[in-house]
Amino acid sequence: MTSYRSEIRFLLNDREVRLSEVASTDTLLDHLRLEQRQRGTKEGCAEGDCGACTVLVGRLQQGELKYETVNACIRLLASVDTCHVVTVEHLRGAEGGLHPVQQALVDLHGSQCGFCTPGFVMSLYALWMENPTPSPREVEIALQGNLCRCTGYQPIVDAALQAADYGKPAADILIRERDAVTARLQGWRDGCRVTVARGGDTAILPAGLADLSAVLQENPDATIVAGSTDVGLWVTKFMRDISPAVFINHLEALQTIRVDETGITIGAGVTYSECEAVLAEHHPHLAEYWSRIGGWQVRNMGTVGGNIANGSPIGDTPPVLIALRAEVTLRKGEVRRTLPLQDFFLDYGKQDRQAGDFVESIFVPHSGENTLAAAYKISKRRDEDISSVCAGFAVTVEGGVITAARLAYGGMAATPKRAASAEAALVGHPWSEESARKAMAALADDFAPITDWRASAAYRAKVAENLLLRFYKETAGGGEPVRLSA
C-alpha cells in the first residue's frame, strides 16, 4: 500500500530544508538565490550552457553517496528530495580559510571579473574530490560546461592541475562527513509518494515503478521529468506549463545497467555519465562521441531514456543507438512492449508512446566481430553544443563484401532516421571508396534537410555525404581518425 508525503526535504550545505509549497516549475537556482540567499550561485544563461550556476548535488546510488556537478538553473527544485545540495558558500579549507581549489585559482590568477568563478570552483571541486591529480584532458572535460568570457582558460587549467598541492581530498568536509550524510539521506528514504504544489502547479515523485505506472494512469497528460536538461528549458525559456510533473530521477529501479552475453540493458533513468564507461567498453567508437554530449553538468543530469523519449530530431543518442540495432521497452501499468528504436519515432514531435506509457529501458546488442562502427557529431562549437548533424554508422563486412549496413542520421529529417537508399547502395558490394561514394549519392533519395539557424540544407546534405566518406577512410585505412588540418 502506497504511503504519502506532502513535502520535499534535502540538505543544503549543513542544514535541513523542508518545503511543502513547491511548484513543478520552481528551479533550484531561484530557490537558492531568492529564498536561501546563497548568491554565490549565479544565473548566466538559464539554459544549462554557461556553468555559472554550477552546484553539487549528492544523491544515493545503490546505497552510496555520489556528488555530481549540475546546472541549478535548469535543475527543478522538486528533484532534489532526499539529496545533499552543496553551494560554493560551503567550501572552506582545513583551517577555515579558502578551499585548496579556491586558493589555487587565486594564486594562479584564474579569475578576473569573477562572475563565472563560483561555477568554475564547483566544477573543479568535484574533479578534485574524484581525481585530485587529473591530466590536462581530464580538466578540459570537467570544464566543458563552464564558460569564461575574460580570463582565458589556461590559468584555470593550471589551477586545476596544481590544486592537490594545496590540500588533499581526505581532509575535505564532504569526505569526512560522508558517512553521516549518507545515513541521514538514507533515513529520509521512506518509500512514500511525494506530492507538492503551489497554486495548483503540482510536482509528484512516485514511490516506485508500480506507483509511477499508477500516477501516469491517474495523470495521462503529465510531463515526465528525468534529468530536466530539456524540460528545464521549457520552463526557463518558453515559460511552459508542465504541471502535473512526474519526477523519476530518484527511482533506482530505472537506474540499472545490466550486461549479458547478448548486450547492454540501460534503465531509462541512467544518466549519460553513468553509462559512459560501459558503452565505451563494448562500443569503443562511442567514447569520444559521448564526451561531446553537453557539458559535464548536463551529462550528470541528462538521461539516455529522456533523450529518446523527448524525440528531438537532433538528439545525440538516437542515431548512434539506431545504428547499433537498439531496442526500447515501454511500460504501461504491468504491460511492456519492446520495439526497434527506429520505429519509436513516428513524425516530428510524435513518438509511439501512448497515454500512460513510459520508457523503461533501452537494449543495445553487442556488435559482431566483422562490424565496423563509427559515431560523428557536427556542431558550431566542439564542446557543449547541439548537433547540426550527427550520425551513427555500422557496416558488416565479410570476405571483403558488405553483408549489412545501418546508417542513421540526426538533423536531416523530422525524426532520427536511417538512410535506406544509401544502405541498399552498400549491401552486396565491396567495402571500397567507390561503394562509399555511391552510397553518398544515394543520400539525396533519403533526406531533404531544412535550413535553420544551426545549418543550411545544403550544408547538412554535404556534411552527411562527407561523414560517410570519412567513415570509409577511417575504417579502410590505418584506422586513424580523419581530421581537418589546422
Image (cartoon, helix red, strand yellow):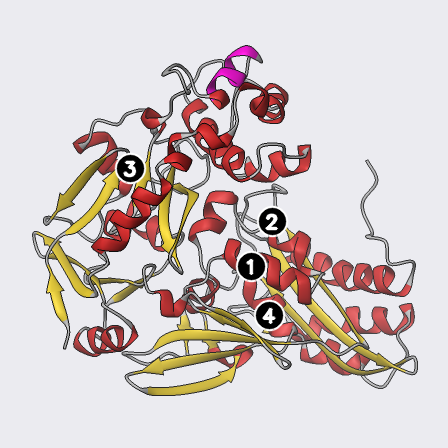
Q: Amino acid at mark 2?
A: Arg
Contact? badges 2 and 1 (CB < 8 Å): yes
Q: Does the stretch in magenta take in 104? A: yes
Residue at image position (19%, 39%) is: 16
Is residue 210 toward the left or the right of residue 485 in the image?
A: left
- The earlier-in-sequence mark between 3 and 1 is 3
Measured Cα–Cα span from mark 2 to mark 1: 9 Å
Number of numbered tags placed on the structure image: 4
Mark 1 neighbour class, 10 Å CA radius: few under 14, some 14 to 19, many 20 or more = many
Mark nearer the N terminus (3 vs 2): 3
Estimate the spatial distance between the alpha carbons at disc 3 and disc 4, rounded to whole Å.
Answer: 33 Å
Question: Which secondary structure, mark 1?
Answer: loop
Snapshot quadrant of residue 245: bottom left
Mark yes or no: residue 237 visible: no
Q: Earlier in the sequence, mark 3 or mark 4?
A: 3
Q: Which residues are magenta?
A: 102-107
Which residue is painted at 36% across and 45% down in the image?
A: 58
The residue where tag 2 is placed is 292
Which of marks 1 and 2 precedes in the sequence? 2
Label 3 packing within 10 angstroms: few (<14), some (14-19), many (20+): many
Q: Which SS class for mark 3? A: helix
Q: Earlier in the sequence, mark 1 or mark 4?
A: 1
The kind of residue on which mark 3 rests is Leu
Q: Is residue 124 above or below residue 420?
A: above
Q: Which residue is mark 3?
A: 29
Q: Whole-percent x and y of residue 416? A: 55, 69
Q: Amino acid at mark 4?
A: Leu
Dot 2 lies on which element? loop
The residues bearing labels 3 and 2 have C-alpha atoms spaced at a distance of 25 Å
Residue at the disc numbered 1: 316
3D distance between C-alphas at marks 1 and 4: 9 Å
Q: Percent position (x, y) of residue 94?
A: 41, 20
